[in-house]
Image (cartoon, grey):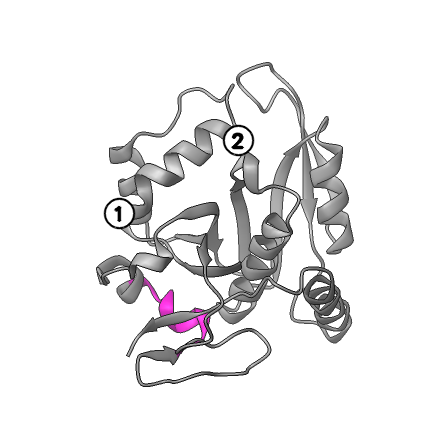
Amino acid sequence: MAYLIRRIQDEDIPQVLQIDQEAFPTQWPHPTYTSFKHELRNRLARYIVACEKKQDNQGITNQTGQAGDKSFWQKFSLAKLFTPATYASSRSVIPVDQKYIVGYAGFWIMIEEAHLTTIAVRETYRRRGIGELLLISVIDLATQLDARMVTLEVRLSNKSAQSLYERYNFKSAGVRRHYYSDNGEDALIMSTDNITSASFQAQFQRLKELHRQKWGETFAYTLTRS
């Protein structure tokens, strides 16, 4: 099974809300269909989803650059798919084999900062490299959108998430006291150095290759209809 990364569409919202409630059961209030749809119209916000896709090698392009028949699929850069006008106005039909969502991520672009607001994976699909794949895609997209750094908040108790972020050169930048409303837990603020720097990109590309080697069946596709 391969996993395709694409821009979210309105019809994905019910599945994304399911994943959100599963991943953050104590969060209150939970987003509704209306509030999430409104968020997708926010010109600062960018959301992506990970979905299952069979590896039939027919008309697909993977992150290694190998391509199948391009008469149906056309490879685009992530940035082109996420310009404000395209992001807000596109209502393309999603092919049947791209409709089952297994994870999603969202961030806001604010001047030169990409602030990661959420990343979540279905419980039955965890520990398959999908969360890391979403993080890689966020960093790639932030770079293409001319961001200089990526920031986030993470629960102080969430050591596994912190370990993943540290691997991708996120560093502690402070604490937000009583940040989480469900239990008053503090949030650790984490931030990257300049993601466009040669040193960051060298390490980032190495980590992407390690991810590819470990999860050889997992590919990140950036596709739209031609």
Dot 1 corresponds to which residue?
11
Does 213 lie within the magenta span?
Answer: no
Q: Is residue 40 left or right of residue 66?
A: left
Q: Secondary structure at mark 2?
A: helix
Q: Give how far across and how far down residue 174 sits, in percent.
A: 72, 36
Q: From the viewer's side, name the closer residue of 41 and 48.
A: 48
Q: Give the quarter of the image for residue 168.
A: bottom right
Most foreground residue, 214 or 28: 214
How many circles with numbers are drawn on the protein? 2
Labelled disc at residue 125 = none
Q: What is the span of residues highlighted in magenta in the rendered image?
A: 75-84
What residue appears at the point 49 percent right and 59 percent down from the top-left corner? 111
Residue 179 position within the rendered picture, expressed as x and y whole percent measured from the top left: 59, 24
Identify the residue position indicated by label 2 in the image. Answer: 23
Would you say 32 lies left or right of 51 here?
left
Q: Mark 2, residues whose alpha carbon is within 10 Å: few (<14), some, or many (≥20)?
A: some
Q: Residue furthest front?
A: 56
Q: In which quadrant will I find the C terminus?
A: bottom left
Q: Secondary structure at mark 1?
A: helix
As shown in the figure, which amino acid type bears the numbered disc 2? Answer: Ala
145 vs 110: above or below = below
Q: Left of 147 or right of it: where is 172?
A: right
Q: Residue furthest top?
A: 183
Res 163 quadrant in image = top right
Q: Residue at x 67, y 24 (%)?
A: 186
- The disc, 2 or 1, on the residue closer to the chain's N-terminal end is 1
